């Protein structure tokens, strides 16, 4: 396990870290870039799954069911400055998603969580790491304003898992 991840050990609790977005649309793909960063930094994290969820799909319901905890990272319109990061945890995540049902994805995150709830696989610990985008234009990398959020969001995710582990 790399030095960046040595403090994170999810003993007997599996965590799914799901990056969603379209990595062909600059900042819309920031969740995918965070996942790739975490996969590079933490290649040997047996109880953490870092998954590129693309633009979401019903097939992700199986992955969600195989984990007790969920962290989603995505470009999220919050009215903040580009690159700002917000963490919505548990019921705050639920409330945020209920108020923001619009999604450019095939299946919305709310739909995926509804499937988990109906199949008795709803994660008790869950969080949405939202990163305010600047642009959704064509491009394979985040804009200069959003790119610094990638390593910061990765650190935030690892800190959140560590906090959950110690609770």
Image (spheres, rainbow, N blue to C red):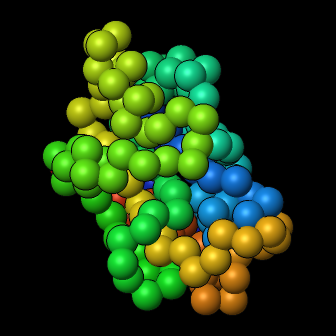
Closest to the observer, 150 or 55: 55
In the picture, measured across the screen, residue 133 lies left or right of residue 42, that is left
State the count of labels.
0
Q: Is residue 95 above or below residue 27?
A: above
User: How far across and how far down the image is residue 21, in percent?
Assistant: 63, 52
Q: Is residue 51 left or right of residue 86?
A: right
Vertical position of residue 139 compared to residue 129: above or below: below
Is 63 situated left or right of 114 in this image? right
Q: Quadrant of residue 136?
A: bottom right
Residue 59 seen by the camera = yes
For the point 44% across and 19% down, the residue is: 65
Depth check, front residue: 24 or 102: 102
Residue 109 occupies which quadrant of the picture?
top left
Vertically, is 22 above or below 120?
Answer: below
Residue drawn at the location 73% of the way across and 64% of the way down: 25
Residue 153 at x, y = what percent?
Answer: 50, 70
Q: Give coordinates of residue 149: x percent, y percent.
A: 55, 78
Nearest to the observer: residue 20 or residue 15 = 20
Q: Is residue 90 visible?
A: no
- For the point 49% across and 48% down, which residue is it? 103
Q: Position of residue 150 (x, y in %)?
A: 60, 73
**Residue visible at 51% across and 82% down in the picture:** 83
């Amino acid at each position: 396990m790399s030095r960046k991840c040595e403090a994170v050990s999810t003993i007997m609790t599996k965590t799914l870290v799901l990056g969603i977005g379209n990595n062909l649309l600059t900042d819309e793909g920031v969740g995918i870039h965070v996942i790739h960063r975490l996969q590079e930094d933490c290649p040997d994290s047996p109880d953490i799954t870092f998954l590129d969820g693309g633009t979401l799909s019903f097939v992700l319901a199986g992955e969600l069911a195989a984990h007790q905890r969920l962290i989603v990272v995505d470009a999220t319109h919050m009215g903040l400055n580009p690159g700002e990061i917000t963490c919505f945890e548990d019921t705050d995540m639920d409330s945020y998603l209920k108020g923001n049902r619009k999604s450019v994805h095939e299946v919305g995150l709310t739909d995926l969580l509804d499937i988990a709830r109906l199949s008795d696989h709803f994660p008790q610990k869950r969080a949405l790491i939202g990163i305010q985008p600047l642009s959704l234009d064509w491009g394979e990398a985040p804009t200069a304003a959003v790119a610094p959020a990638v390593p910061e969001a990765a650190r935030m995710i690892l800190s959140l898992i560590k906090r959950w582990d110690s609770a």
